């Protein structure tokens, strides 16, 4: 670099491109801008329209158990055969998904589960407090509901199937109260009668409109002088000490000191040409949202035996869940969202006559459920913030803090896991 340019670079604010305006990228852009960086947030769509649009809104710092728990292999035949099972794999996509699936299954051994739980617990720490502060700062405190989460099981046998997850929560000091039927009814009088065992996480919280939350963040970012550019980023090229974007429209050819890739489930394609082969796969999830019905429950209720989250959103009741391995390109399978709506209607008769609309989103998932957050190995100025799986809303603000600390020169725990970055 010309010494005069080096001097200029040292005296001016760091120019950072954040690719992807989901809850993760938008949180990062806002955190960096607040700390003085010159930030451009790029997305082909408006902020918050990706996976962050339709999630269940749960802020779940107690979810330290990865998805691949010991015993997960037993669920594989069901995944392949039953299109309504909570886990489903499309046959046609199997050859593409196989390397990831093998890593997923390999992650399900006790030692790896312990390691993932420790990393997840560290990333989740303080999430509820951080979101509470953020909703206040954004002027939308009404978006945070602090009434805990109630997980429901029909009986002890059903609870026993999730015993590993509850044991891990206990090991990490997560506060959980076991409730009998009377305890369940005291919190949720409309809870379906066959649920006799409740596990209540009183410290957990819910964002009542995840899309409006990201939009509020994006507005705050723009008001603080951040730029939001609507563009498809096609490539990232190192050029000297800078990064140049290949993009549609005005952003094409723009140069930055740093680039943060926060493209959710699409991040893999952007990184592959740079030699970074992330073991990232989309776990497609669905929701059915009822027009009204939000008042049948007063907090997030999880039908744990059906793996369905019910959330009392500000604009109706949302039933979210399912994991479908079918790639980024296949159209949504409406049967899966219909199954969510059916179970919700069976569980709560008040929903029976309410219309519901459906949605599908791409969870960006690593085999061991641990997001990739930090500096890209061997590529100065490139930062990774993806792979947040089932907990990207929960972990968005803590991810933003880690990236801002690392990028602006403060110490950070940089995630460089050989298991996840080596060839997928
Ligand atoms: C049904 C369901 C329920 C869920 N429930 C919860 C929950 O209760 N709590 C929780 O914490 N998490 C939940 N999640 C997970 C959470 O929604 C995700 O982890 C999170 O939204 C991921 O955020 P993200 O910003 O990484 O990705 P996204 O929101 O998908 O954002 C990525 C953005 O990058 C853009 N992009 C990608 N590549 C490019 C490119 N080349 N050029 C331009 N733009 C690009 C996309 O357009 C997109 O806007 C749920 C997910 C689903 C599907």
Image (tube, rainbow, N blue to C red):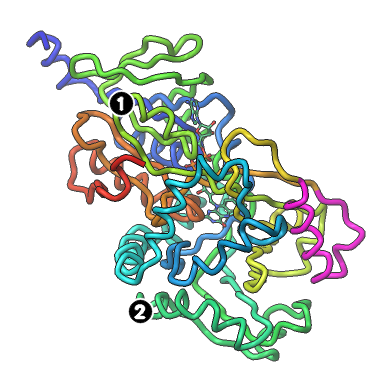
Label 2 CB less than 8 angstroms from ligand 1: no
Q: Is residue 278 magenta?
A: no
* Residue 183 image point, x, y percent: 65, 88
In the current view of this chain or complex, which residue is farthest to the right? 353
Q: Considering only vertical position in the picture, is 378 above or below 180?
A: above
Vertical arrangement, residue 304 with respect to residue 184, above or below = above
Residue ID for mark 2:
171
- In space, the residues marked 1 and 2 are separated at their CA atoms by 39 Å
- Give the quadrant of the C terminus: top left
Give the residue at x 32% y 47%.
Answer: 420
Is 263 on the left or on the right of 52, as rendered?
Answer: left
Q: Is residue 230 left or right of residue 116?
A: right
User: 288 left or right of 324?
Assistant: right
Q: Are marks 1 and 2 in contact (CB under 8 Å)?
A: no
Q: Secondary structure at mark 2?
A: helix
Q: Sequence-wise, which precedes: disc 1 or disc 2?
A: 2
Q: As rendered, which of 326 and 323 lies closer to the eye?
A: 326
Q: Quadrant of the N terminus?
A: top left
Q: Position of residue 398 (x, y in %)?
A: 37, 52
- As helix, strand or loop, the secondary structure at mark 1 comes to helix
Q: Does residue 340 belong to the magenta stretch? A: yes
Number of the label disc, if any, that sits on residue 274: 1
Q: Nearer the viewer, residue 74 or 120?
A: 74
Tell me residue 339's x, y (percent). Answer: 77, 58
Q: Which residue occupies 69% across, 87% down?
A: 196
Query: Which residue of the protein is positioned furthest toward the left in this rendering?
Result: 3
Q: Main secondary structure of the magenta part?
A: helix
Residue 118 visible in the picture = yes
Q: Which residues are magenta?
A: 334-356
């Amino acid at each position: 670099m010309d010494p005069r340019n080096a001097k200029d670079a040292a005296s001016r604010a760091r120019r950072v491109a954040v690719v992807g305006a989901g809850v993760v990228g938008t949180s990062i852009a806002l955190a960096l801008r607040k700390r003085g960086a010159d930030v451009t947030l790029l997305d082909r769509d408006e902020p918050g329209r990706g996976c962050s649009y339709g999630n269940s809104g749960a802020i779940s710092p107690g979810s330290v158990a990865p998805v691949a728990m010991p015993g997960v292999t037993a669920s594989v035949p069901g995944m392949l055969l039953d299109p309504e099972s909570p886990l489903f794999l499309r046959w046609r996509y199997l050859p593409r998904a196989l390397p990831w699936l093998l890593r997923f299954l390999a992650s399900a051994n006790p030692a790896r589960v312990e390691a993932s739980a420790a990393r997840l617990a560290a990333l989740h720490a303080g999430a509820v407090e951080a979101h509470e502060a953020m909703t206040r700062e954004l002027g939308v405190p009404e978006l945070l509901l602090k009434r805990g989460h109630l997980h429901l099981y029909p009986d002890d046998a059903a609870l026993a199937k999730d015993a590993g997850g509850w044991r891990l929560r206990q090991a990490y000091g997560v506060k959980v109260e076991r409730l009998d039927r009377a305890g369940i009814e005291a919190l949720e009088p409309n809870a379906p009668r066959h649920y006799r065992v409740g596990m209540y996480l009183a410290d957990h919280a819910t964002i009542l409109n995840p899309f409006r939350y990201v939009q509020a963040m994006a507005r705050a970012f723009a008001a603080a002088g951040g730029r939001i550019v609507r563009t498809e980023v096609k490539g990232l090229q190192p050029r000297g000490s800078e990064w140049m974007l290949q993009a549609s429209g005005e952003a094409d050819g723009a140069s930055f000191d740093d680039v943060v890739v926060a493209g959710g489930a699409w991040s893999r394609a952007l990184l592959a040409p740079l030699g970074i082969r992330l073991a990232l796969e989309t776990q497609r999830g669905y929701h059915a949202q009822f027009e009204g019905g939000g008042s049948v429950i007063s907090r997030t209720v999880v039908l744990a035996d059906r793996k369905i989250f019910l959330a009392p959103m500000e604009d109706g009741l949302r039933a979210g869940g399912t994991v479908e391995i079918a790639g980024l390109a296949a159209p949504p399978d409406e049967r899966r969202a219909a199954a969510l709506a059916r179970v919700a209607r069976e569980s709560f008769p008040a929903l029976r006559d309410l219309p519901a609309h459906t949605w599908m989103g791409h969870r960006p998932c690593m085999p061991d459920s641990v997001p990739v957050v930090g500096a890209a190995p061997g590529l100065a100025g490139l930062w990774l913030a993806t792979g947040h799986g089932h907990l990207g809303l929960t972990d968005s603000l803590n991810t933003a803090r880690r990236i801002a600390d690392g990028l602006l020169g403060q110490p950070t725990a940089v995630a460089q896991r050989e298991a996840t970055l080596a060839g997928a």
